[in-house]
């Protein structure tokens, strides 16, 4: 046998066991979200959870923060991101468009849902939403479909107010009403207790609505979905390391619960008129 051929065979025999046992590199996953804060702040908020989930899933995970909800949904639809931390409205769009799967919901102050409250000063004559026609009204986020839908479900459209404004934060809304800058506004129910003593009262409540959603796309491995869900549910605020992960994401978060279709029923019904 030719000397060169013998050397080639020996080389192949030496490398074959290694080649057979070699594992393909783990490409890992990307978790997508909307950059509700400036990018550096959003990374700071999400990084502890991202690192925790990477360790629990045994796969590297990187974070991708999109500037807009539409971009985050497109990344999710195209498989650029495989896991997503989304608003419930964004999740419902992803579910309807390409079968996204809700995995878990964060508990905010112990609950997987919240309610929006239409509030007025204690001395306001308004008893129900329709009494606010012709008056001024303050919203929080201009892009929030929940806020608009909660108001209009009560029987009044934005066009029927004398003046509206978007004050970004619910605390700003509450203070503006107390200062008589606006006749009424919308805030989270959980804030009402803080401002009730100062003179706010509720005239309307929305149905229970989910806060955020951890979801995966339809091609995400089933066994990894279980690992992801279990890892999220195991987060316990009594454990300091876990508490740091939760509060970095949101100071009000106290854990996660498995997501079910019933969590989204009220939200779907509330926003249905705006999604035709």
Image (cartoon, rainbow, N blue to C red):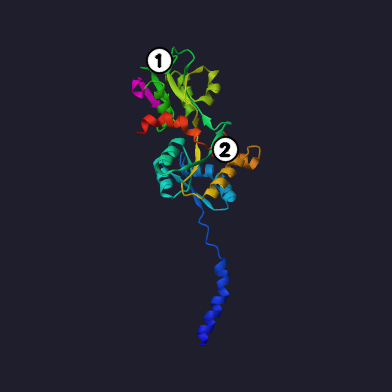
Identify the residue at image location x=55%, y=69%: 19
Q: Is residue 61 above or below residue 24?
A: above
Residues packed near mark 2 inside 10 Å, few (<14), some (14 to 19) or many (20 plus):
many
**Magenta residues (range):** 157-167
- Note whether residue 131 is visible: yes
At 56% from the left and 40% from the top, the residue drawn is 248
Q: Is residue 54 magenta?
A: no
Q: Is residue 162 magenta?
A: yes
Image position of 59 (left or right of 153): right
Q: Which mark is residue 192?
A: none
Which residue position is annotated with label 2? 256
Number of residues whose C-alpha sits closer than 10 Å to that of mark 1, classed few (under 14), some (14–19) or many (20 or more): few
For residue 131, the mark is: 1
Q: Earlier in the sequence, mark 2 or mark 1?
A: 1
Secondary structure beneath label 1: helix
In space, the residues marked 2 and 1 are separated at their CA atoms by 39 Å
Question: Residue 167, position in %: x, y?
Answer: 43, 28
Q: Is residue 166 visible?
A: no
28 or 158, which lies in front? 28
Q: Residue at x 55, y 78 (%)?
A: 11
In depth, the one of 67 and 31 nearer the eye is 31
Residue 186 is drawn in which quadrant? Answer: top left
**Where residue 75 sits in the image (x, y, percent)?**
42, 47
Of circles 2 and 1, the one toward us is 2
Q: Position of residue 174 (x, y in %)?
A: 48, 23
């Amino acid at each position: 046998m030719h000397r060169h051929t013998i050397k080639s065979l020996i080389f192949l025999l030496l490398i074959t066991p290694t080649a057979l046992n070699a594992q393909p590199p783990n490409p890992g996953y990307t978790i997508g979200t909307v950059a509700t804060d400036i990018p550096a702040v959003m990374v700071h908020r999400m990084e502890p959870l991202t690192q925790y989930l990477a360790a629990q899933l045994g796969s590297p995970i990187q974070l991708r923060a999109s500037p807009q909800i539409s971009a985050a949904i497109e990344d999710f639809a195209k498989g650029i991101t495989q896991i997503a931390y989304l608003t419930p409205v964004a999740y419902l769009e992803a579910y309807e468009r390409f079968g996204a799967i809700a995995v878990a919901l964060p508990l905010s102050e112990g609950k997987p849902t919240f309610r929006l409250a239409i509030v007025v000063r204690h001395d306001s004559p308004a008893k129900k939403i329709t009494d606010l026609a012709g008056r001024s009204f303050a919203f929080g986020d201009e892009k929030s479909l929940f806020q608009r839908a909660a108001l209009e479900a009560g029987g009044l459209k934005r066009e029927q107010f004398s003046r509206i404004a978007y004050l970004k934060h619910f605390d700003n809304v509450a203070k503006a009403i107390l200062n008589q800058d606006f006749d009424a506004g919308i805030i989270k129910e959980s804030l009402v207790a803080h401002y009730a003593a100062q003179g706010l009262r509720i005239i309307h409540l929305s149905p229970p609505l989910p806060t955020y959603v951890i979801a995966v796309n339809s091609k995400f491995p089933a066994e990894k979905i279980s690992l992801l869900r279990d890892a999220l549910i195991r987060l316990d605020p009594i454990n300091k390391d876990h508490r740091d992960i939760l509060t970095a994401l949101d100071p009000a978060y106290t854990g996660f619960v498995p997501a079910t279709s019933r969590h989204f029923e009220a939200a779907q019904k509330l926003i249905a008129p705006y999604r035709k």
